[in-house]
Amino acid sequence: MLRVLLVEDNDDHAELICRTLGEQRWALQIVHVNDGESALDYLHRRGAWVDPDQSPRPHVILLDLRLPRVDGLDVLTSIKQSADLRRIPVVVLTTSSAERDIIHAYDAHANSYLVKPFGFEEFRNLMHDVGVYWLTRNTVSPT
Amino acid sequence: MRGIFQPPRFDDEEQTRIARIQHLLLLLCLAIALSASVINALLGRSIPTIALLASSGVVCIALILLYTRRLHLSIIVLLSLFIALTASLQFIGRGAHDTVTSLYATVIVIGSLLLNRRAFIAMVAVILLVIAGIVTAETYGWTRSPYDGEPGDWFDLALILGLTAFASRLLSESLQRSRALARKNAEALEAQAAALRASEERYRILAANLPDSAVLILDHDLRFVLADGPELAATGYSKEALEGRLLYEAIPASFAAQVEGNIRAVLSGKRFSAEIPYEDRIYYYHYVPLIDDSGRVKYAMILALNVTERRRAQAERERLIAELEQKNAELERFTYTVSHDLKSPLITIQGFLGYLERDLRAGNTERMQNDIQRIDAAVRKMERLLNDLLELSRIGRLSAAPQHVPFNEIVQEALELLAGRIAERQARISVAPDMPIVYGDRDRLVEIVQNLVDNALKFCDNQRAPDIEIGVIKESSGSPIFFVRDNGIGIDPKYHEQIFGLFNKLDPRSEGTGVGLTIVRRIIEVHGGRIWVESAGAGAGATFYFSLPVAPVLIPEMSNAQSAPG
């Protein structure tokens, strides 16, 4: 089972991502949370996610930057500062192509930075590449 | 009448002095000659009487010559009279051996005082010639002298009189030189004093006219030597109240003690500057030691420059720069947010359009329905975002002229606009009576209350009916602080600042674009007030506080929270 943690506040975008990723024939489990606080709760196994069986470690985290409550960069920083979590690849997936966002994301040790493209085909292609690369090509760190 | 018997004045001071001596001599001689002639007349001695009267006549001629400004001729006449008289007395007396011969010495001394060098030498030569004549006459027995004259007598007399002439001339000339020297020194001193006065005058003019300045000079006794300048009056002191007085006499002891250290430092040779506030002004002090030619500090000079205006302008400039920087940053954040939030619905629309096409081909009508709904919602969201942005951009320009409005009227209007929603939620709303009159753009002020009450209704706790309270706290500083309090879901303190950010929403699924509080804050800031929220956290309800002006305040477009009270 390939697990993805999708941190995305826009439900439409979340559905688009889920649908494009789901087109592949993989056994895929996507956990979608819609704000930064929930993402950290899931990863640090707090609140609704206390049970480790309910919150298995994802193979990749797809992270939006502009999030309610806790900002995407803060989520990223928190992940990369945590000894338990920092080896999980974090792919920033955002509408922002602002220079400072890219710099801040890499400064906070993002593993990849992707800008959501305009156009259906472009979006599908990108999500296809993300799935192939991060879920099938990339070797995750042993826990 | 008196003027006639006065010696004449000459342009040359030396000549005037000689004329005065000559005058005195002539009067003296006249008096002696006349009184002697009277005595001789009484004694019945006719020849001496006649001789003395004749002499008096000559003296009178000399006097007339003097009064008609013929000084040299007058002197020559008098000295000639002396020589002639002496020679006559020698002739009728004991020749060169007569005691009257010593009168020549007197004539020589007088001559040395009154004559110039050439005339003096000529006079001495004449005297020696006359004596030679007398000695010759004595040798040949033409006189009544009982002695036999011989050339040796002439040599003796010539030697004595020559030496007398030399010595007296030497004395007279050195006297003249000293007098000339003294006169020159006096002139130089006078010129120096005049130059000094002119210089002092110049620096006084300088001190009195240095713009926005006061100049103070103190000596080692801490006595004001100079106090001047246009700024002096502004400090409440005057030139007269300071100059010549000691520091501790002239100004209050506390202030004097404050500056004494600095003045002593200057007097020890230090040179420095300091900025010191005085009352409501700021002065920039230059402390300068005034050093004399020998390199010692003679005075301490304090140049006080009123820099209040300059500092104020500087502070104002810095404030404006900071404000501009803040606005710039705000604008950048705004652009960033807008571009992000406007992009999102476009991605949604394009994504679901793609799926719509596929679903159409696959004939999956159920999914097509969903795709169309998503697209429709995204378009609506886009429209709302654009409308909100437009609304936000309009706030900077006040829609109507500001006016005084009772805050209760504003609340009333806002509540009427929300009447439907209030009824729907069965909310209880209490409004404090007699709230202050505020000053501002009426429609915008209504918008503030409308947005805050709307928010309170939106984030109510579903377990209980919304209870909203609108009131005012009287601030001690005079500016009222209004509040809208609810018993809703509350706001975690860590989000108290975030909620005012553009398109920031704590709950992504809540209705609205997240612009409401941004608009409220913008309106309040444009009115020169500020807004903040207090809430203990989840379930504790929230209170929004905001200040508004009660009277016109300067509200430029660039205004920010700095002008707000509290």
Image (spheres, coloured by chain):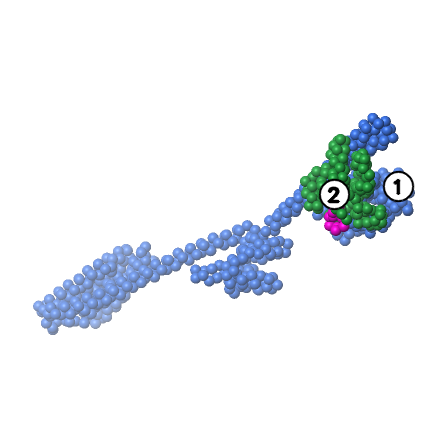
Location of residue B153 with respect to B212 vertically, above or below: below
Q: Which residue is drawn at 54% across and 57% down?
A: B272
B115 in magenta: no
Tag 2 and tag 1 share a subunit: no
Location of residue B479 with respect to B265 vertically, above or below: above
Q: Are marks 2 and 1 in contact (CB under 8 Å)?
A: no
Q: Residue at x 50, y 59 (%)?
A: B289
- Label 2 packing within 10 angstroms: few (<14), some (14-19), many (20+): few
Asked whether residue B58 is in view, the answer is no
Residue at far bottom of view: B146
Q: Residue at x 74, y 43 (%)?
A: A139
- Label 1 packing within 10 angstroms: few (<14), some (14-19), many (20+): some
Label 2 resides on the chain identified as: A
Screen quadrant of the N terminus of chain A = top right
Quarter of the rendering containing residue B158: bottom left
Residue A56 image offset from top left, x and y in percent: 82, 46
A84 in magenta: yes
- Give residue B408's mark: none
- How many numbered marks appear? 2
Residue B210 image offset from top left, x and y in percent: 53, 51
Q: Which chain is green?
A: A
Residue B65 image offset from top left, x and y in percent: 26, 57
Label 1 secondary element: helix
What is the magenta range? A80-95
Of the residues shown, which amino acid type is indicated by label 1?
Ile
- Give residue A139's mark: 2
Horizontal side of A67 relative to B199 (left or right) equals right
Mark 1 sits on what residue?
A: B422
- The CA distance from mark 2 to mark 1 is 57 Å
Q: The blue chain is which one?
A: B
Instruction: Judge by depth and name the residue closer to the eye, B514 or A96.
Output: A96
